[in-house]
Image: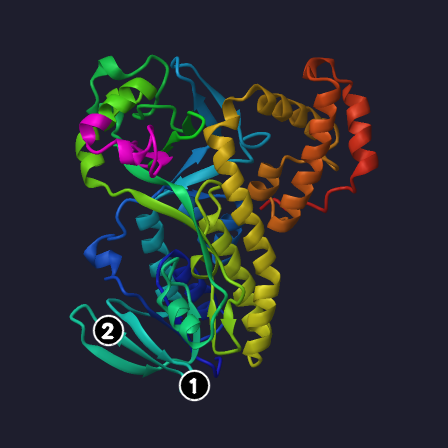
Amino acid sequence: MSQHPITLIGGGLVGALLAQQLAQRGFAVDVFEKRPDPRQAGFLGGRSINLALAERGLHALRSTGLADDVLQRAVMMRGRMVHDRDGQHGLQRYGIDDSEVIWSVSRGALNTLLLDAAEAAGAKFHFDQALTTVDFDRQRIRLADANGVERELSAGLLIGADGAGSALRAAMNAHTPLGERVEPLDHGYKELEIPPASELPAAVLQAGEGRDGFALEPNALHIWPHGSYMCIALPNTERSFTVTLFLPSQGAAPSFATLPDAAAAATFFTEQFPGLLPLMPRFAEDFEHNPIGTLSTLYLQRWHLDGRALLIGDAAHAIVPFHGQGMNCGFEDTVVLANLLAEARDDHAEVFAEFQRQRQPNADAIARMALENYIEMRDSVADPHYLAKRELGALLAARIPTHYMARYRMVTFTHLPYRYALERGQAQDALLEQLLRETPDVATIDIDTAAQRFVSTLAPLPELRHG
């Protein structure tokens, strides 16, 4: 067993998965979570944007033996089902076939599974324990329970997996400034729900739309793109869909500021998303009671305080959700950190520095790509030039798979570093733009000549790992 006990702050998804991996490697792990145990009190996280599980997250779950259990509780999504204003829709696949899909998972169900697995591995969880202060010099922490009663404990090695609002990050920043920068997105979100088809009048269900008890096609992420705003819908195992409206927070219509109540929102939906409103019988209740969520990106210059404390996951690099990679990136963090700690148990300062060296460039890259993907989802998916680039890219991927892979596939279905995917994607995009400037009609492009240009300009892709 390790001689260095580890204190984890935060028992959410990343904290629980990291706790399991560390316990499996012989570390003594205590996890302090400010919320009550969701297995007893129910999940109190409220509604949240559905979690999209992709290859990076699955790889982390495979390493702990949990992937199959999680997939049994998930719904496969083959691609984006793009709905236009006239009620027409079409599927834009994420990958080349059903070997490249993402999975819609419930945050609450996943957290419960991870907690059980971590405890079975030997990690100890302490709920209703909020971090209040940290004495880094003495390596002591103070915690407060649900009644405000405080206690002080020896901390051991401190790791913060307590999310975007991290209490440990605040304590570290107060001790030694971390170079924190938060960039808010001027768009917010509100969550709504489409119930199972059995709860809807037959008249509102479009012929051929849903199956297996779903009101819409279940194996897709649905998007209603409207340029500067959009709705999305992700399937749940209960045959419902979680619908999320993304809209500017302030300013002229349309914005949340111009939708003061459910009646105004219903009028807006009738005009802009006419086929969607009839599928949401509890629209007024959901709109009035569900809060407007905020979105932002967190950047830190420093993720650790020498060898005493480290931040991981959203506590170090929270991003907007538009690439579906926040959880996947956090899970990837846990594999890297657990391996580094297992390999060099005594030199924590070096481990923490190496963790930041490896992960920060990749966290910055996925933060940028997530922001870019918001524009793509709400606008580009219906743009003819985007569709032409997508078509040309698909032809090249089939012709020269060693030299061309769409950036989305690199991010979602491989283990290539995020930073590589960003830089390679930029180089590929420049060549695609060049080809389409010369010959705007994809059907008239000489694919052999185009492929030769890619092969002669770009190095081969690294060896790809799927699964």
Q: Does 336 appear above or below 371?
A: below
Mark 1 residue type: Asp
Residue 240: name its quadrant: top left
Q: Which mark is residue 137?
A: 1
Few, some or many C-alpha atoms within 10 Å of disc 2 (few <14, some 14-19, many ≥20)?
Answer: some
Left or right: 159, with 396 as reference point: left
Could you tell me which residue is drawn at 57 percent across and 41 percent down? 413
Q: Secondary structure at mark 1?
A: loop
Residue at point 52%, 55% (across, down): 332
Q: Is residue 181 visible?
A: yes
Which range of residues does the magenta coloring cover?
237-264
Looking at the rendered structure, the kind of residue marked 2 is Ala
Mark 2, mark 1: which one is toward the viewer? 1
Q: Which mark is residue 124?
A: none
Q: Residue at x 73, y 43 (%)?
A: 461
Q: Is residue 258 magenta?
A: yes
Asked if the stretch drawn in magenta spans residue 218, the answer is: no
Residue extending furthest toward the bottom: 138
- Residue 112 image position (x, y, % from top left): 32, 55
* Image height of 305 relative to 107, above or below: below
Q: Nearer the viewer, residue 415 or 361?
A: 361
Identify which residue, 353 or 121, lies in the foreground: 353
Instruction: Indicate the position of residue 132 as horizontal and vertical percent values.
Output: 29, 73
Colour theme: rainbow
In the figure, residue 259 lies in which quadrant? top left
Residue 282 seen anywhere in this rendered image of the structure: no
Give the x, y percent position of residue 13: 39, 56
Q: CA distance from mark 2 to mark 1?
A: 20 Å
Helix, strand or loop status at disc 2: strand
At a point 61% along the width and 41% down the height, the residue shown is 410
The percent coordinates of residue 363 (x first, y second) are 54, 54
Residue highlighted by disc 2? 144
